Amino acid sequence: MDNSTTTTETAAPTLPTSFSDVFALLMTFHALRDWLKLIVLGGALETCRRLVFGTWAAFISSFFLTAHFEENDTSYEWMMVWLAQHPAWQKAREVQISTRDYRNYDSSPAMLEGEEHTDSHFQPTRKLAYLPSFGTTNLMYFRGRRMTVTRNRQYLDEGSTHESLTVKILTRSRVVLNELLLEAKRAYTDDSKHRVSVFVPDSYNNWRTVQSRPKRPMSSIILRPEVKNMVLEDAREFLASEKWYAERGIPFRRGYLLHGAPGAGKTSLINSIAGELGLDIYVITLSKRGLDDTSLNALITDMPARSIALMEDIDAAFTHDVQRSAASSDNSDLNGGGGVTLSGLLGAIDGVAAQEGRLLFATTNHVERLDAALSRPGRMDIHIDFGLATKWQAGELFKAFYPPAAREDAKREAADDSDASETDTLLESAPATPSKQPTTLAKKDEITNLSYALRPPRLAPHVLNDLAAKFAEAVPDQEFSMAALQGHLMGFKTRPYEAVDAVAAFVERERTAAKRKAQLAQEKKDAAAAAVAPAS
Ligand SMILES: Nc1ncnc2c1ncn2[C@@H]1O[C@H](COP(=O)(O)OP(=O)(O)OP(=O)(O)O)[C@@H](O)[C@H]1O
């Protein structure tokens, strides 16, 4: 017997040492193998699906033209006005209803289709506006072409939002897009024919429309005709002479400095000029928090050509005490809290980046405080001094306030009232003494306030002239602002006789108030001086 023992050696399991060993090991598990097959197959299928869909989308979009419109661009405004007028929204199933006109054109309440108005004195003309709602894609047709409109709103920091529009038109031709833009611009222009748009910078210093004001007729600005016509004609001529400027190498810009008493019509004149020349107004407040030289420069560069830059109360930001310095941080305390330096402003007005073809209007109540560099020709080419109201202005303001009605208008109104004889009496023989308001009006006044407010007397021109002369006689020359006189007349919107009657009391009251104010100012000054004296 062989004592030798036979040992059966069982190999100890060895751990896989390479990736292929691991893979081979895993492959021994059937389920895992099947899973892996599934993953590979699924991945391949998904890739194929994406490829097909991507190619399909690219194929489809090759037939479309896509245009993006961003809120801070004027083209966005064109499109929104055009869309608001488009009949497609009347049928759309998801729309944004706006009771305001898209650009705040009209402050009267909106009227629904089929709604009847109960108040015969108050006839709103504005309809409800239907706009694309946010986040939806709307289908419509432009010149027979399929078109989709998507309006998006993005929420930014500080709670502000940014809107955009994406328009896709089934065409490969740029001509169609151009036609759409032309039509939208035309809609916008027609819509704003009687309006002046006012833009201000938002918190990110991007221009935004804030208001669309009705145009103010030049005739309503009471200034010596030669002054107001000179400014208007100068601005008109400037806009028409781009070539002249280019040939002489003179920068195509014009600046106007309107200075003088507060409430004398500086801002009103600028609004009227903007309306007359069809220009938009871009308001720059130099002392605005967050505005520095760089953002001011960017704002002026971003202004469209042929527009008005309006800098009101320019003295509030800069006085001749301020040193010209490029370092805004050094100056920020001196220039009214804003970060704009005088040199920054000068650079923005006429530096390389300054916009060509723009009219700059600056207003101030203290022209003597302005740095000479700011008001020199080339920056402020025309200076206009606005004084306190002259007697002539007082009389003209009165006439503008109670315009005489044309005889035919008065007759038509009289027929409507079936009371023609009363109106005729009014026109022919209005009372000679201011204290007697015509009785027909007095009666109407008693009936309802509304009819009272809407029925100013229709005075014959010679009666109106007499009253205006009496009013002007009672107002001292160059003592009160036009705004103050207007304030007085506002208290007598439909009562010209009483307005004349009460003007003497108004003058007395204003004088007493002015005296009191001067007294208080003096007392304050004395108190300040007394406080300084012991200390020094
Ligand atoms: N010359 C004027 N003709 C007609 N209305 C005037 C005139 N001046 C002032 N007003 C009236 O007074 C009000 C204030 O006018 P406006 O704001 O234009 O004055 P301003 O000179 O710009 O004043 P401020 O310097 O205080 O800004 C307006 O409602 C305007 O209708």
Image: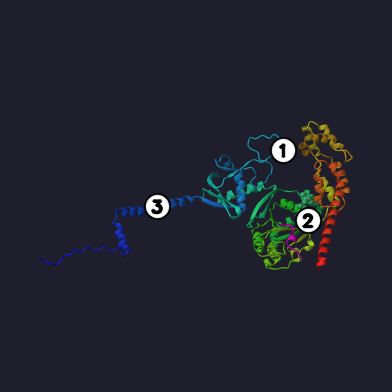
Choose the circle earlier in sequence order: 1 or 2.
Answer: 1
Q: Position of residue 401 (x, y in %)?
A: 80, 45
The kind of secondary structure element at disc 2 is: helix
Residue position for label 3: 46
The reply to whether the magenta stretch includes residue 184 is no
Q: Mark 1: few, some, or many residues within 10 Å (few <14, many ≥20)? A: few
Residue type, mark 2 in image: Met
Q: Is residue 380 left or right of residue 130?
A: right
Question: Which secondary structure lies at badge 3?
Answer: helix
> Which amino acid type corresponds to the residue marked 3 in the rendered image?
Glu
Distance between the Cα atoms at labels 3 and 2?
A: 74 Å
Q: Is residue 214 above or below residue 522?
A: above
Q: Which residue is mark 1?
A: 122
Q: Where is residue 356, by image quadrant?
A: bottom right
Measuring from the top left, give residue 334's x and y in whole percent: 72, 64
Q: Looking at the image, do the residues carrying marks 1 and 3 touch, with CB atoms under 8 Å apart?
A: no
**First in sequence: mark 3 or mark 2?**
3
Looking at the rendered structure, the secondary structure element under dot 1 is loop
Q: Which residue is mark 2?
A: 230
Q: Which mark is residue 171?
A: none
